[in-house]
Image: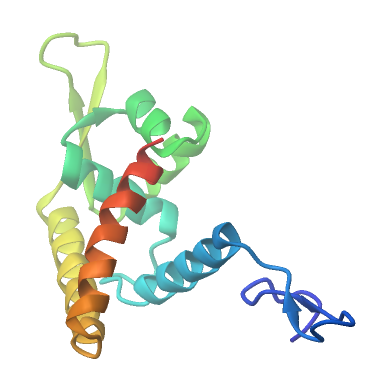
Amino acid sequence: MSSTDISSPRTTTSADDPTTPLSSPASDLRIATFRLARRMRTQRADDSMSDGQFGVLAALWVHGDHTLGELADRERVSAPSMNRTVNCLQDAGYIGRSADENDGRKVVISLTDAGRAVVDETARRRDAWVESALEDLTAEERDTLARAAEIMGRMAAR
C-alpha cells in the first residue's frame, strides 16, 4: 500500500498485535461507500459527463424542475458553479430553460427527453450491476444491505 492510498485502513505494529488496524466503523463505511460509488460511476450512460453534471440530471429526474439557485442549494455548490454545470448540460441537449409561469423573472431548468434518457439508462445499468452483485450474496447478507441502505439514506439526508 502506498502512503497515498486512502482506500485501505492503515496498520501499525504493537507488541500485542503487529497488524492492529487503525480503522473504525466510520472509516470502514467511508471506504466501502467510496469504492461502491466509484464502481457505480462506471455504469453511467454518458461517459463524458462529470459526477456533478450527472448529479444535476438526477436531481431534476427525482425532484422535478428547479431554478438555478434551488439546484445550487440542493447540490451544495455555489450559484456560479451551478451555472457552468447547467450551461454544459444545456449545450449537450440534456436540459432546457424556460420562464417561470408564475414569475417571469425566474428561469426554470428542466430535463429534456435526451436528459431523461441518460438518467433512465444510467439507472438501468446501475440497477443491473447491483442486482448481479446481490446474486452472489446470501439472503442474510441481502437483508443486511437492505437495512443498511435505509440507514445510509437517512445519513445522506442530514
Q: Is residue 39 left or right of residue 104?
A: right
Residue sitting nearer the eye, 84 or 34: 34
Q: Position of residue 143 (x, y in %)?
A: 20, 69
Q: Of residues 62 and 142, which is closer to you in this image?
A: 142
Q: Quadrant of the C terminus?
A: top left
Is 14 located above or below residue 22 in the figure? below
Q: Is 23 left, or right, of 69 in this rendering?
A: right
The outermost residue toward the right is 15
Q: Nearer the viewer, residue 107 or 59?
A: 59
Q: Residue at x 22, y 85 (%)?
A: 138
Rendered image quadrant of residue 38: bottom left
Splitting the image into 4 quarters, where does residue 75 fall?
Answer: top left
Q: How is the image coloured?
A: rainbow
Outermost front residue: 16
Where residue 118 sits in the image (x, y, percent)? 20, 63
> Measuring 23% from the left and 53% from the top, which residue is drawn there?
93
Q: x%, y% of residue 123?
A: 19, 65
Q: Is residue 89 visible?
A: no
- Percent from the top left, x then y, of residue 35? 48, 73
Give the answer, above or below, for where 17 lies relative to 74: below
**Residue 137 seen in this snapshot:** yes
Question: Which quadrant of the figure has residue 117?
Answer: bottom left
Q: Is residue 148 above or below residue 63?
A: below
Up the image or down, 156 lies above or below 135; here it is above
Q: What count of labels does the image hold?
A: 0
The residue depicted at 19 percent of the width and 11 percent of the height is 104
What is the quadrant of the N terminus in the image?
bottom right
Foreground of the two, 33 or 21: 21
Q: Is residue 98 left or right of residue 17?
A: left
Residue drawn at x 19%, y 54% is 115
